[in-house]
Image: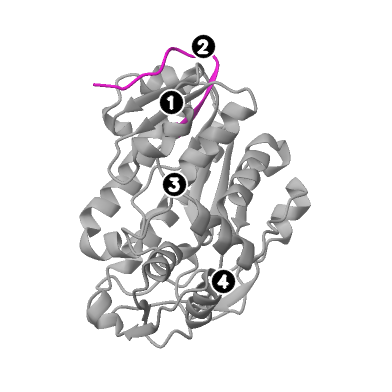
Amino acid sequence: MPFSILHPPSSHVLVTGGAGFIGSHLVERLLRDGKSVVVVDDLSTGRLENLAPMKKHPNLRIVVSKISMCAELPALAAGAEGIYHLAAAVGVELVVKSPIRVLETNLHETEVLLAAAAPQRTPLLLASTSEVYGKSQKPAFSEEDDLLIGPPHQSRWSYACSKLMDEFLALAFAKERGLPVVIARLFNTVGPRQTGQYGMVLPRFIAAAKSGQPLKVFGDGRQSRCFCYVLDTVEALVRLQSSPAARGGVFNVGGTQEISILGLAKLVIETLGSKSTIQFVPYADAYAPGFDDMLRRKPVVEKLARVTGFQPATSLNEIIRLTAGG
């Protein structure tokens, strides 16, 4: 049965995946901005606990359902002033262990939502991923770059392909049916409420450092990433959805302070004053034989700054402190 908290006015913002890590922070921000919000989430990876701080808010309604099984979806999409589509199967571990679920969730649910949004041309922001850049060896990724996806027998690339097809489908709806869409390619986003359950590296490291356990670094640790604080990501999403100039565009959203995973482990230990050690774990033991990883993943974010006037700026040291405190 859907879990509802009162009934918001007829005009609302629809957030799919709103009980997830990023989604719950987005919902909190929208409510603070005076919006009425309807969340649709099947709780497969999201948690109602993430929405606990907003539980008594009179303008929040939560519908526990898959998008494709939500009988109210056409009405919810038609009556919305905007839609944020964050519902997706996420995390490298889930991608490797449940590839069918990943493909079905990311492809079918997005198609159903776009079809529901199209009749009234409800503005829709699609949360995509840096994974679509695939195996490219460029030092930094731009929205106009060619994409290089790995072979189909390596299941991790199924996630990249499913999200890339989401992008193609959204842009097709924009072209053929006039649907106002914006695509946000999210790079590593971190902060309070994120768990390490599906392989997310920073919450894993923080939990280990707090408990004095070894921080497990997969591979040799030389692979590098850029991390963006979740409230910076939310700010970028809100600005993109609110900007007419962003419609029909693809935008990188992420931090630009690059660090190796080994360096991140050392920084977490130092920042939290932990006595933990570092343990190297082969990829074959962490995931599966033949696992293919990207050595670098740094976004070019000039387009985001040019269109929205915003560029994520929270330092990595501060991100670690805020995440550990949350």
- Residue 55: mark in rendering: 1
Disc 4 to disc 1, C-alpha distance: 33 Å
- Going by the numbered disc 1, the residue's amino acid type is Lys
- Going by the numbered disc 2, the residue's amino acid type is Ser
* Percent coordinates x, y for residue 40 in the rendering: 38, 30
Eye-nearest disc, 1 or 2: 1
Eye-nearest disc, 4 or 3: 4
Q: Is residue 114 visible?
A: no
Q: Earlier in the sequence, mark 4 or mark 1?
A: 1
Q: Earlier in the sequence, mark 4 or mark 3?
A: 3
Q: Earlier in the sequence, mark 1 or mark 2?
A: 2
Label 4 belongs to which residue?
A: 271
Q: Is residue 49 above or below residue 256?
A: above
Eye-nearest disc, 4 or 2: 4
The secondary structure type at the circle numbered 4 is helix
Label 3 belongs to which residue?
A: 21
Q: Earlier in the sequence, mark 3 or mark 2?
A: 2
- The residue lying at 75 percent from left, 54 percent from top is 305
Q: Are marks 4 and 1 in contact (CB under 8 Å)?
A: no
Tell me the magenta residue range.
1-15
- The residue lying at 34 percent from left, 40 percent from top is 47
Eye-nearest disc, 3 or 2: 3
Label 2 belongs to which residue?
A: 10
